[in-house]
Image: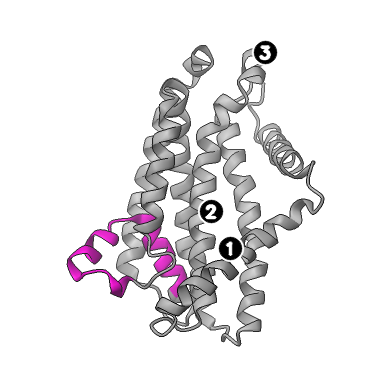
Amino acid sequence: MFDTFSEKKFLLKELVKRNLTSKYKDSVLGILWSFFNPLLTMLVFTAIFSMLFGRNIENYPVYYLAGRLVFDFYNQGTKGAMNSIRRNANLLKKIYVPKNMFAISAVCYEFVNFLISFVILFAVMIITGATFHITLIYSVIPLLFLVILIFGVGLILAVCNTYFSDIGYLYNVFTLVLLYASAMFYPIEVVPAKVQIIFTLNPVYCAMSCFRQCVYGVVPDWSMILYLAAFALTALGIGILLFNIYEKKLALEL
């Protein structure tokens, strides 16, 4: 049951579709919130922080929005995967479904939102007169490893949160710290040089920084790319290993 690729593909498509429809079913604007949410927060943050950092950052709205898209994708993707098993507890207790499909579908759903948000980024670039550089092609590389990172961390969190529900509360605090440790709305130059080294150990910051470099016409830092790739692939390996070990036991913990 659900052993063939086509069956899993169909299940994944249906789960992503269900996530899309369930989130916006009671909303008047529906999926348009995927456009308005990053746009409205960009306007608020630009109004507040452009006065502080605007002189140090070229085209602050683009700088902020490029970072926001990366962070939101990581934040929402990993949290969606983390809660996917518990959220579908009733279904998992009744029938056999590959449990990792729920975590994967949660990440795929957030990836759809991420792609939709690109429209906002490009629109803001056009409005603010930003140049579309050829280096945008390179952005595929950090974004690919970001997706792998989210899958890996998401699988790890899905298993841990099934056994220990406190993980969800702790992870909310962790992502808040991660937000400020990713230099999303301020230039890293305002941080002391010794602390900047710590920032480079944050894979989300690496993905964000490399993506911004591509947007601003700079070839991404390959040392950051390699670190991000190593971290992401390690997280994915650990996540797959944990799921293979505990998948059959997860339903018993719900």
The span shown in magenta is 188-212
Q: Where is residue 105 shown, x and y percent of the image?
A: 62, 39
Q: Residue at x 36, y 73 (%)?
A: 187
Going 63% across and 23% down the picture, which residue do you hit? 97
Q: Quadrant of residue 243?
A: top left
Prevailing secondary structure of the magenta residues: helix
Alpha carbons under labels 1 and 2: distance apart: 15 Å
Residue 150's place in the image compared with 145, above or below, is above
**Picture residue at 63% right of the left edge, 64% below the top:** 40
Residue 199 is covered by the magenta coloring? yes
N-term mark: 3 or 2: 2
CA distance separating discs 3 and 2: 31 Å
- Which is more toward the observer, 26 or 21? 26
Judging by the rendered image, the residue that carries numbered circle 2 is 73
Tag 3: amino acid: Lys
Q: Which residue is mark 1?
A: 41
The amino acid sitting under disc 1 is Thr
> Disc 1 to disc 3, how far (Cα)?
41 Å
Q: Which residue position is annotated with label 3?
A: 94
| 164 up-or-down from 76: above or below | above
Disc 1 versus disc 2: nearer the observer: 1
User: Does residue 146 appear left or right of residue 7 in this picture?
Assistant: left
Q: Please state if 199 lies on the left or on the right of 110 as rendered.
A: left
Q: Is residue 166 above or below residue 24?
A: above
Q: Secondary structure at mark 3?
A: helix
Circle 2: residue type: Phe
Q: Is residue 65 above or below residue 75?
A: below
Quadrant where the image shows the N terminus: top right
Classify mark 1: residues with Cα within 10 Å, few (<14), some (14-19) or many (20+). some
Q: Earlier in the sequence, mark 1 or mark 3?
A: 1
Asked if residue 185 shows in the view, the reply is yes
Asked if residue 19 lies in the magenta stretch, the reply is: no
